[in-house]
Image (spheres, grey):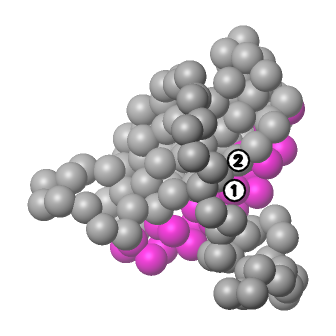
Amino acid sequence: MRRLTLVRRNPALTQEQFVEHWLGEHSALAQQLPGLRGYRINPVVQAPDGFEWHGVAELWFDSVAAAARAMDSDPAGRRLRRDTPLLAERVVPFFVEEHLILPPPQPRSRSVASGSTDPSGRTSTR
């Protein structure tokens, strides 16, 4: 089950600070959630005028109930909830039913967990 979350950054942060915090401290906390099967963040890099969201988080769990248990867990969920206002002014979580039509290409961007991938597909850790 995939949980998506629309994220509006804390206005006290620049976009650069927002992404840095999200990729760093907040991601480290999220990865401690019990039952988390996958995690991806998507900072917005281009959007139409007036678009109010600065990113989308994707978290995979076995079920909606498993996600609820993870978010309510102590200490991992509590730490994540405490950090969220430092990152975001508003978050809107919801669950989706995924239907994969065409698999996306392999990412060539920096991966927090595995390092960076160069254009040839080789991964290097820093």
| Front residue (pair 122, 7) | 122
Which badge, 1 or 2, is on the more N-terminal residue?
1
Task: List the residue tagged with mark 2.
Answer: 39
Q: Nearer the viewer, residue 53 or 26?
A: 53
| Range shown magenta | 14-34
| Residue wearing tag 1 | 27
Residue 75: say if magenta: no
Give the residue displayed 59% in from the left and 36% down from the top. 100
Q: Amino acid at mark 2?
A: Tyr
Q: Nearer the viewer, residue 123 or 63?
A: 123
Distance between the Cα atoms at labels 1 and 2? 9 Å
Quadrant where the image shows the C terminus: bottom right
Q: Position of residue 6 (x, y in %)?
A: 42, 41
Residue 90 in the image: state x and y as whole percent. 38, 41
Q: Residue at x 53, y 25 (%)?
A: 96
- Tell me the amino acid under the disc marked 1: Ser
Q: Is 24 included in the stretch rendered in magenta?
A: yes
Q: Residue 48, located in which quarter of the rendered image?
A: bottom left
